[in-house]
Image (tube, helix red, strand yellow):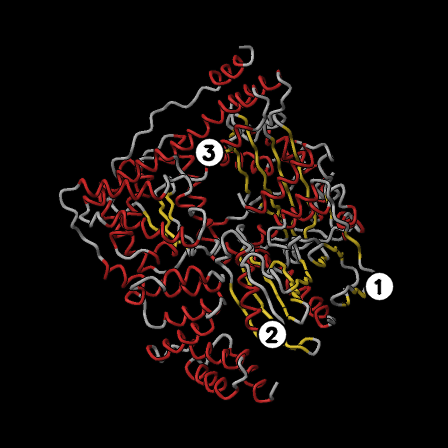
Amino acid sequence: MRHILPALAIALLTACETTPITPMQGYEDMQTLAPEESRLWYSAAELDQQLQKSGSLYKDEDLRAYLEAVMHKLYPEYDGAITVRIVDSPSLNAFALPNGSIYINTGMLSRLENEAQVATVLAHEGVHFTNKHSWKQRRNVKNTTAFSTGFGMVIGIPGLGDLISLSSIYGYSKDLEREADADGFRRLQAAGYDVSQAPVTFEFLLAEVEALDIDEPYFFSTHPALEDRINNFRELARQQASVNGYKGAEAYRSHVDKLQLELLADYLELSQQQSVLLILERQGAFDRYPPSAWYYLGEAYRLRNEAGDTERSVKAYQTAIEQSPGFAPSYRALGLYYMKNNDSLQAENYFSKYLELQPDAQDRDYIEYYRTSLKSGE
Amino acid sequence: MSHQRGCSLLLCITLVLAGCASTPSARLHYTIKQDPGSRPLQQVVLLPIDLDVYELSAGGVREEVPEWSSSAESSVRNALLVSKGTGGNCCVTREVDTSSLTPDEREALDEHLALFNTIATNEMWASLPYNTAWHFKAEHFDYTLGDGLGFLKDKYGLDGGLVITGEDVVSSSGRKTTAVVGAVFGIAIPLGHSILMGGLVDFSTGDLLWLNYEVSGAGEADLRDPASCLELANNLMKDYPGLLSADSSSDRTGK
Amino acid sequence: MKITAVTIVLVLVLLSGCAPTWVKVDNTGRNYRNEHYSITLPAGWMRLESDDGLILSKDGILLQIISIQFRPHKDTFEKIKKDSSATMLPSELAQLSIAELKASQEDNLPSLEILHNAPVGLGGRTVFYDHLRYKTKAGLRMDMEMRGVVDNSGFYLLKYSAPTLHYFERDRQTYEALTESLQL
């Protein structure tokens, strides 16, 4: 009892914030902020600036405008005030700042298959903003740590409050995530999207997480586990009288085509060949990717370098040349293969073709060095 | 708050709170130490001040309060600009109008301020008590930002700039209550601190002519309070070398 | 200890009291040799030996840093989980070194620019040479040069990094002279 009293005293004296946090109804509500809320918006604005200055944003105004148009369909009452920006990162992530800045990674965009799926993600993130989840979470953290600090002192572990605060900061609580899923689903339906795509969005992400044997990506870190969310969405979709709606596969692909190939290159630059294999070995992948993607598949096999991968990579490069004869990197890849296998003639043929197709290649100096070495017999 | 500025302030706080050292003494460019009259600057201006004021919740959550930060910047700016009249040691009479800079000039200025923070962090690191091999950097203080701020000299006729950065962490009432109860159990709860960091840059050469830090523990200073800002600014500028032209020669020694 | 762009890790090690020993390179101590290589160090610079290799700086590790690292062919590139080999091409080594650099940063260095990437001669061998640039979170541009080569025993990497403003160009020749003195 002696030890409980100080903790209770702390909890009472450090009076928890109790001003009710009510969801926004539209653009007008963005114009008046409570003092506690305005601090969060200020921090969010600073983070916006930092992201812009840091070179982290992917520059494609056409794609950005397309995503903002999707957002406007989902949240028409906000008059386009909810912004969408693209982060140049291959990881599967999307997040919402308290000031209405929504960010989605190129990695996430490259995985999705149609507009209904990206609308699922944007609708979800939009709810975090409209329902002021940042503020709720922040208050929860401050109030939790206030009590925890007192409690921590009682049980003789100073700093326990900081530990709880830290673990809560990484993502929203499960309750808030479930709210975002449910409200987001309603937005999806109201905007006329095919709601059967909502669980699909997470099904293939789950497949990827499992195949790559990674901890669930940040987007999902305190989210209800992926399987729970898939089941939840399936139930929501089942409850709807009609699930037919707009999918928007062609419209989506026309905006992300360039991005998809760039992501394959990004993964290879980071030596994340497993991600490339997961994407391109999936059935029907080459319905969605241009034929030059065979080159990236070849590179992924080369980097993986398991038994049989050399033969697979050569076959993939050859397929790339057959189906996309103007795509230069495939020739370089075969040139390097033949050079390593001491076939100077073939190597020179392919190197020569590579430089003919891409005279301003960034690695021209390397290729010329290899050609010179081949001629001198080194 | 810039990432790099955060590192230098972290070092500063850690040193002081750990009792490893008192606030490091002011650094003076070695050419000035050798010949105090050798680096006169005609016009010294205040570069954009960067101060952040945070509130610390009961549980130790830090949150910037933008209106406090803005007010602190105003108070410190006023303190520096009127310092001479109140027995202080500062000499600046104007500040750079950033709205008159082109986007490229603003970007250049921001990058040089980021470099200043990096240099300040580096100097703190070199001054760590057990980093004795690097203590020569304090004795032969010769850092430079390069000549990239020469445009300020050309465009505005300015010789040098005073850089001021810092932060204040203010405990909420809940945090103070927690500390009181904590004391009963013999548990120390950090309550905050105030830090000002100042540097003088020669725009022609980019040399950092002077660098100083002023650190106060919880309750000793409060950047929300104009009077406290004046005192902190005066303490910061106590060893300021002045370096003015002959028409303000009484300030040359900075005393 | 791996040298990364976030040198605050090194600083915190110092704060914990585990202070590594820096030594000034004087005229008599310029010739450095270990079981893998020999090299001539610049006089007046500070030198630190770590498990990972040799580190040099003149003004402090945040203002310029030269590192010379040797890694065996197994687990050469820890972050991207790749080995090197004696037969690897310079372009392949360059690709893996850049991938390792990106993977060592939380955000994968989205601002990284490759200013130059080409083979160069060094000590009778052909090595890769990269000149890179990126921005820190604080908005400070950093330049980095890397030269790397393999032999039968492992992978050698020489790096030089400094702020683009003033510092990088100022000491670039010192770094290049050092690399030219490398003997495997």
Are circles 3 and 1 on residues that touch, CB within 8 Å?
A: no
Residue at the outermost left position = A241
For discs 3 and 2, the disc positioned in front in the rendered view: 2
Q: How far apart, in angstroms, are the residues tagged by discs 3 and 2?
A: 62 Å
Q: How far apart, in angstroms, are the residues tagged by discs 2 and 1?
A: 37 Å
Residue annotated with mark 2? C87
- Taking B238 as reference, is A45 left or right? left
For the point 48% across and 58% down, the residue is C110
Q: Secondary structure at mark 1?
A: helix
Packing grade of label 2 (10 A; few <14, some 14-19, many >=20) is few
Residue at the outermost top position = A1
Q: Provide the chain ID for the residue under circle 1.
A: C
Packing grade of label 3 (10 A; few <14, some 14-19, many >=20) is some
- The amino acid pointed to by label 1 is Asn
Q: Secondary structure at mark 2?
A: loop
Q: Nearer the viewer, residue A129 or C18?
A: C18
Quadrant including the C terminus of chain C: bottom right
Q: Percent x, y for residue C1? A: 67, 52
Residue annotated with mark 3? B67
- The amino acid pointed to by label 2 is Thr
Kindly identify which numbered label has been placed on residue C27.
Answer: 1
Q: Of marks 2 and 1, which one's residue comes earlier in the chain? A: 1
User: Which quarter of the picture shows residue A174?
Assistant: top left
Q: How far apart, in angstroms, are the residues tagged by discs 3 and 1?
A: 56 Å
- Looking at the rendered structure, whether the residues under marks 2 and 1 are on a common chain is answered as yes
Asked if residue C89 is positioned above or below residue B24 in the image, the reply reads: below
Q: Is residue B227 visible?
A: no
- Taking A275 as reference, is B126 left or right? right
Residue at the outermost front position = A307
Asked if residue B229 is positioned above or below residue C174 in the image, the reply reads: above
